[in-house]
Image: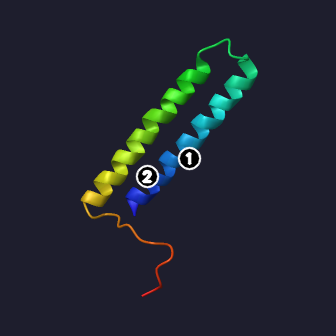
């Protein structure tokens, strides 16, 4: 359960970083490096989330499923 919460928190950080990049892009009109820094943070957190998903699957903490599978 804790790995699912961690993945959701990382997803929220990714969305926050993407929002801040958009804010800096609109506010600074491309004159600063804050947009690039925010997008770099987003990429780093996305990689961390992907690795967390791989580790969670490998450790058996999460399992893939199909949203179209009939309930068992």
The location of residue 14, given as percent across then percent down, is: 54, 41
Binning the other alpha carbons within 10 Å of mark 2 as few (below 14), some (14 to 19) or many (20 upward) gives some
**Residue drawn at (56%, 47%) of the image:** 12
Where is 52 relative to 16, above or below? below
The label on residue 34 is: none
Q: Residue furthest front?
A: 68
Q: Quadrant of residue 17?
A: top right
Q: Which residue reaches farthest bottom?
A: 72
Residue 25 position, x and y percent, is: 69, 24
Q: Nearer the viewer, residue 16 or 64?
A: 64
Cα–Cα gap, marks 1 and 2 = 10 Å
**Residue located beneath label 1 in the image:** 12
The quadrant the C terminus occupies is: bottom left
Residue 43 coordinates in the image, percent (x, y)? 47, 34
| Dots 1, 2 in contact, CB < 8 A | no
Image height of 16 relative to 28, above or below: below
Label located before the other in sequence (1 or 2): 2
In the picture, residue 16 is in which quadrant?
top right
Identify the element where label 1 is drawn: helix
Q: Tag 2, which secondary structure? A: helix
**Identity of the residue drawn at 45% across and 52% down:** 7
Q: Residue drawn 45% across and 72% down?
A: 66
Q: Image height check: is 23 above or below 46?
A: above
Q: In the rendered structure, find residue 6 and report the number of the disc placed on it.
A: 2
Q: Is residue 44 left or right of residue 24?
A: left
């Amino acid at each position: 359960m804790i790995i699912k919460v961690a993945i959701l928190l990382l997803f929220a950080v990714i969305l926050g970083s993407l929002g801040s990049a958009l804010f800096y892009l609109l506010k600074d009109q491309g004159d600063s490096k804050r947009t690039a820094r925010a997008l770099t943070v987003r990429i780093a957190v996305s990689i961390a989330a992907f690795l967390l998903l791989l580790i969670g699957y490998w450790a058996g903490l999460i399992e893939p499923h199909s949203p179209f599978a009939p309930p068992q």
